[in-house]
Image: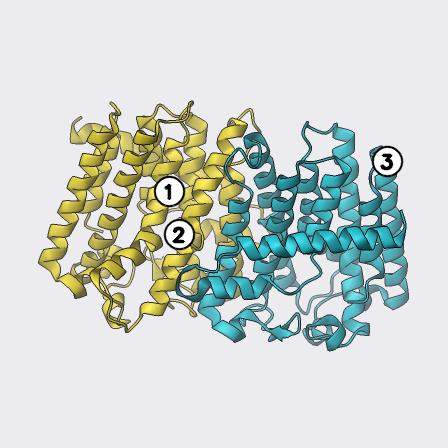
Chain colours: A yellow, B cyan
Amino acid sequence: MSAADFRAWSAAQLARVEQALSDWVPQGAPAGLGEAMRYAVLDGGKRLRPLLALAAADAVDGHAEAALRAACAAELIHAYSLVHDDMPCMDNDVLRRGKPTVHVQYGEARALLAGDALQALAFELLTPSADRVPAAMQGDLCRALAQAAGANGMAGGQAIDLASVGKPLTEPELRAMHALKTGALLQGSVRMGAACAARPLPGGVRQALDDYGAAIGLAFQVVDDMLDVTADAAQLGKTPGKDAAADKPTYVSLLGLESSRALADQLCAQAHAALDASGLARVHYLRALADMVVHRKS
Amino acid sequence: MSAADFRAWSAAQLARVEQALSDWVPQGAPAGLGEAMRYAVLDGGKRLRPLLALAAADAVDGHAEAALRAACAAELIHAYSLVHDDMPCMDNDVLRRGKPTVHVQYGEARALLAGDALQALAFELLTPSADRVPAAMQGDLCRALAQAAGANGMAGGQAIDLASVGKPLTEPELRAMHALKTGALLQGSVRMGAACAARPLPGGVRQALDDYGAAIGLAFQVVDDMLDVTADAAQLGKTPGKDAAADKPTYVSLLGLESSRALADQLCAQAHAALDASGLARVHYLRALADMVVHRKS
């Protein structure tokens, strides 16, 4: 597959996701809540999690509407986590995707509720009537998302992150934190895409896709830490240098830039190897996404 | 059914729920997150939502493990909403169920994350392996819970509540707010219990149970407003008189105590009438719960 083929696929999927998010995140929710939810979700973000879900669904010839819903649900969880993470009691950030953060724009109370409502909406998207998404698939999708988002996934990783400020972490500790904080939802996005298969996948295929998800999940964070040092605010759409200023442990502070780059490349190779091991024929989008994660500039 | 029969059933169910919550809310979640989650959930609360789910499941001869999971999931959503609602940017309350609120005990950041993780855990409880809860039932349960919790349910009601401080509301506006803020999850608990039926219920039965849930949902709030005026902190386990102090519209401020009492009784009669209309034979626990909601002292 050529780079142009991937760009065309990616652009088409992003357009579908953007339209679906705009259709599904409610305009009309009470008392300005819908406005804050849409502000948090629409017109921004790389949509990496949706692309992972859609690419994984493509690899297993998955149910089309289920895949689109899984893609959007993963993005809603990501978006809610950013809203809460930016709040004064957490990272206290004022700039996100080049715009004022949700609590700056709408106040803390509405930001808190918008995040809460976005999490609920993610599960609502996964559970339409059974003529839209097969009933048995809905439970699998909700399970994968709930595990990725919860105490032993993203929320747990954020709790470790909070508790780690100013503490020296070893590389295994840092890896364990990121495996939850960002890795769980990235891996969960791949898992949800795989759950859109018409028939249960063999255990070996599921494991290979999980390995792929784990590798790119960690690679994403290593690159994120590098960009926090090397990129500027205009590129990032958020405040750079925050991690160092907050005395947070990062891959760069632990390994240095060069070794971080080498680790990212090694994880990319691991992701490719996992796809080879899956035995699936159509993994070219997943492969291209791994490259995109590691070579991104923002 | 005698009052003693209901007390015995209720005590047995509460013991099951308490044990299940203790088993399912993780001790071991990272960085003290599990501790905060358990603090928010265990050893407190009337467990009205679990009882409603279990009584509704009993009425439709529902799947036993699904019903217990639905009961606990509803309680987790309720518990997370209290954690977030008590935070300084919302109601800024320091006392709940006779104990310091979660953010007072563990700090705001961990309270925020504990609430987030409790919401995810609710959906995780509803989606165990298919040999525990039938796969097709899992989607129905998640749908009912997500709708009850989200922007057009509980979170939306809280947004209206926030926007209403210091504003004169009409009785229909107050009713619409409470139908979402507390009514949606109470009604959703009944709906989840009903979704544990082995076969889909006839539309008329579903509607009757929804009518029951709507009536007791509103009755609960009317009585809550009355108790805010008439009970003391020891009875309530939270700070009384907060609504009046916060200049929040209540049934008591709108209708006065006597008319509020009359409205609660009328809603209780509506709930009973809905149960009669359901045609279900085993509705005695639901009936007793309606009475309990209206005559409670805390």
Q: Is residue A222 above or below residue A17?
A: below
State if disc 1 and disc 2 touch (CB < 8 Å). Answer: yes
Q: Which residue is tagged 1?
A: A188
Q: Nearer the viewer, residue A165 or B254?
A: A165
The disc numbered 2 marks a residue on which chain?
A: A
Q: Which residue is tagged 3?
A: B277
Same chain for mark 2 and mark 3? The answer is no
The disc numbered 1 marks a residue on which chain?
A: A
Q: Is residue B288 above or below residue B62?
A: below
Q: Is residue A195 visible?
A: yes
In the displayed structure image, the side of residue A269 where residue B275 appears, left or right: right
The image shows residue B109 at horizontal and vertical percentages of 44, 68
Which residue occupies 86% across, 35% down? B277
Which residue occupies 24% across, 38% down? A289
Amino acid type of the residue that numbered disc 1 sits on in the rendered structure: Gly
Distance from Cα at disc 2 to Cα at disc 1: 9 Å
Q: Earlier in the sequence, mark 2 or mark 1?
A: 2
Q: Which residue is tagged 2?
A: A153
Amino acid type of the residue that numbered disc 2 sits on in the rendered structure: Gly
In the displayed structure image, the side of residue B142 where residue B4 appears, left or right: right
State if disc 3 and disc 1 touch (CB < 8 Å). Answer: no
Which residue occupies 43% across, 70% down? A89
Looking at the rendered structure, the secondary structure element under dot 1 is: helix
Distance from Cα at disc 2 to Cα at disc 3: 45 Å
Q: Which mark is residue A241?
A: none
Farthest residue to the left: give it.
A258
